[in-house]
Image: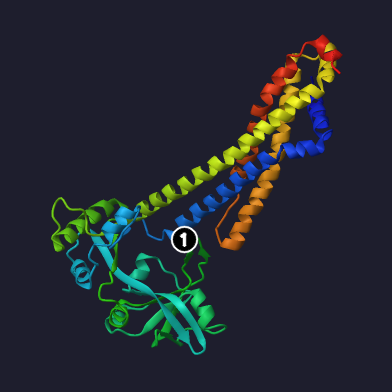
C-alpha cells in the first residue's frame, strides 16, 4: 500500500471517532504534560543554580562551622562544633598559608532596617572583609564596595541590594544617603544590580557592611565566621590548599588523628554534586509518576484499538480479499496508534510548557522549554502508541479472510 494512502486511511479512521480518540489520549496527554513541565522546571533550575546560586569560583572554597548537611545525624554532629573565631581567621590570614592567595571572612544575620517612614523587618545583613567582593565577584550598579581603610576604621558604610533600594529609597539615588540598621545609622556607598529571586533565594535584599562594624555592633558571642579562601595557582592548587587549611585548623583546635574535622569545607564541585543528587531524586520520582500515566494511556490506546479491530473486521477482510498484504494491515493499525499517541504528545507538550511557564511566573522557578524537551515529549508519546498498537495490529493482520468478510 502506498504510504500516502496508508496515512489517508489512518487519518480517516481517527476522524470517524473524534471524541473517542480524544478520550483515548487523556492518559498520554497527562503523562507527557507532566514530563515536559518537570523537565522544563528542573532544566531551568539546573541552569539557574549553576549561574546564580553557586557563585563560588572553581578555585574558591568555604570553611564554616556546618558545611554541607545531608542528614539529621550530620546536623547533630555539626551543631556541636565550635564556632570559627576571629582569632582563627587572623591566624590563617597572617601569611602562613602557602597555598592560598586570598582569604576573606564574613558573618551575617537578619535584622530590621529603616529610613524615615520606610521599614523592613527582616533584611540579610552581612559583615564582610573588603576582599569578599572580589572572591564572590560582586558587581556594582553605582558606587563601590568598602575599602580596607574603612573596615579598619569601623566606618558605618553600607552596600545595598536592588530590593532594599526600592523599599527604602524609592525613586531616589541611594548613594550618600543614610539608613538605620537596628537603629544605627549607615551611609550608603554602593548599589548592586538587580539579580532577581528564585527557589527561595533573594540576593537583592542584602546589605553588606564592614566586618569590623558587624563584630562590634551586631555579632553574638557564639556566632561563627565563614571563611572564603582562594587557592594559589587556580583549580590546580585547590586540593593542596584545602589539605593545608584542614591541617592548620586541626592543629589549632588540637583535633586528634582519628577524630573527624571540627569544621565543614564547601567547594563549587561539592555544591554542584549536592544539587545534582537533589534534582536527580526529584526527577526520578516525578518521572515514575508520569510513567504511570503514560502506561495507563498506552493500555487505553491498546484496548480502544482492539475494539476498533472488532468493529472493522469486515473492512479488514475486504482489504485482504482484494490484495492487501498482512503487513499493510499491520502498518495501518500501527500508524493509527502512533498518530493518536503523537497527537496526544503534542497536546501534552503544549499543556506542559504552559504549566512550566505558569510555575515560573507564579513561584519564580526559572523554567525553560527547549527543542530537545519538546521532541522528547512527542517522541516518547509516539513510542507508547507504537507499543500499544502492536497487539491490535497483529490480530487484525492475522484475521481469516472468509470469516472476516462474513462478520456482522
Q: What quarter of the picture does the C terminus occupy? A: top right
Residue at 51% x, 75% y is: 163
Above or below 285: residue 60: below
Residue 162: % across, % down: 50, 74
Query: Tag count in the figure?
Result: 1
Q: Is residue 205 left or right of residue 79?
A: right
Taking the image as drawn, is residue 380 in sight? no
Above or below 72: residue 118: below
**Front residue of 348 and 94:** 348
**Front residue of 169 and 193:** 169
Residue at 23% x, 53% y is: 240
Residue at 49% x, 77% y is: 164
Residue at 54% x, 79% y is: 166
Above or below 164: residue 65: above
Q: Residues within 10 Å of mark 1 (few under 14, many from 20)?
A: some
Furthest toward the bottom, the residue is 116
Residue 323: % across, % down: 82, 12
Query: Which of the 4 image quadrants contains residue 6?
Result: top right
Q: What quarter of the picture does the N terminus occupy? A: top right
Q: Is residue 319 left or right of residue 247?
A: right
Give the SS element for disc 1: helix
Q: Which color mode does the image show?
A: rainbow
Residue 176: % across, % down: 45, 87
Q: Is residue 239 left or right of residue 386?
A: left
- Which residue, given by chain and number where applicable, does mark 1 sit on? 52
Amino acid at each position: 500500500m502506498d504510504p500516502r494512502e496508508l496515512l489517508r486511511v489512518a487519518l480517516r479512521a481517527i476522524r470517524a471517532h473524534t471524541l473517542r480518540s480524544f478520550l483515548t489520549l487523556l492518559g498520554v496527554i497527562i503523562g507527557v504534560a507532566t514530563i515536559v513541565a518537570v523537565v522544563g522546571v528542573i532544566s531551568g533550575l539546573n541552569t539557574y543554580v549553576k549561574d546564580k546560586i553557586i557563585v563560588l569560583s572553581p578555585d574558591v572554597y568555604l570553611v564554616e562551622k556546618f558545611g554541607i548537611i545531608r542528614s539529621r545525624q550530620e546536623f547533630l554532629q555539626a551543631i556541636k562544633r565550635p564556632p570559627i573565631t576571629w582569632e582563627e581567621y587572623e591566624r590563617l590570614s597572617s601569611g602562613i598559608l602557602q597555598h592560598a592567595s586570598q582569604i576573606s571572612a564574613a558573618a551575617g544575620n537578619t535584622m530590621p532596617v529603616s529610613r524615615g517612614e520606610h521599614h523592613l523587618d527582616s533584611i540579610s545583613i552581612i559583615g564582610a572583609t573588603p576582599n569578599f567582593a572580589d572572591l564572590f565577584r560582586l558587581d556594582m550598579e553605582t558606587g563601590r564596595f568598602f575599602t580596607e581603610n574603612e573596615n579598619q576604621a569601623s566606618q558605618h558604610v553600607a552596600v545595598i541590594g536592588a530590593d532594599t533600594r526600592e523599599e527604602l529609597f524609592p525613586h531616589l539615588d541611594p548613594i550618600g544617603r543614610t539608613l538605620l540598621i537596628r537603629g544605627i545609622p549607615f551611609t550608603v556607598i554602593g548599589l548592586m544590580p538587580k539579580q532577581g529571586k528564585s527557589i527561595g533565594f533573594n540576593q537583592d535584599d542584602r546589605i553588606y557592611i564592614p566586618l569590623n562594624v558587624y563584630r562590634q555592633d551586631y555579632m553574638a558571642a557564639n556566632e561563627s565566621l565563614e571563611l572564603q579562601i582562594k587557592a594559589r595557582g587556580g583549580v590546580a592548587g585547590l586540593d593542596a590548599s584545602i589539605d593545608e587549611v584542614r591541617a592548620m585548623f586541626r592543629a589549632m583546635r588540637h583535633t586528634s588523628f582519628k577524630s573527624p574535622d571540627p569544621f565543614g569545607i564547601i567547594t563549587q564541585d561539592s555544591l554542584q554534586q549536592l544539587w545534582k543528587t537533589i534534582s536527580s531524586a526529584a526527577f526520578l520520582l516525578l518521572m515514575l509518576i508520569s510513567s504511570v500515566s503514560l502506561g495507563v494511556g498506552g493500555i487505553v490506546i491498546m484496548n480502544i484499538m482492539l475494539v476498533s479491530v472488532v468493529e472493522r473486521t469486515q473492512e479488514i477482510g475486504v482489504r485482504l480479499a482484494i490484495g492487501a498484504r498482512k503487513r499493510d494491515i499491520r502498518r495501518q493499525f500501527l500508524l493509527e496508534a502512533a498518530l493518536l499517541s503523537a497527537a496526544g504528545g503534542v497536546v501534552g507538550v503544549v499543556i506542559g510548557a504552559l504549566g512550566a511557564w505558569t510555575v515560573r511566573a507564579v513561584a519564580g522557578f526559572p523554567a525553560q522549554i527547549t527543542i530537545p524537551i519538546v521532541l522528547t515529549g512527542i517522541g516518547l508519546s509516539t513510542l507508547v502508541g507504537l507499543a500499544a498498537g502492536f497487539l491490535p495490529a497483529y490480530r487484525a493482520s492475522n484475521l481469516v479472510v472468509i470469516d472476516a468478510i462474513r462478520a456482522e
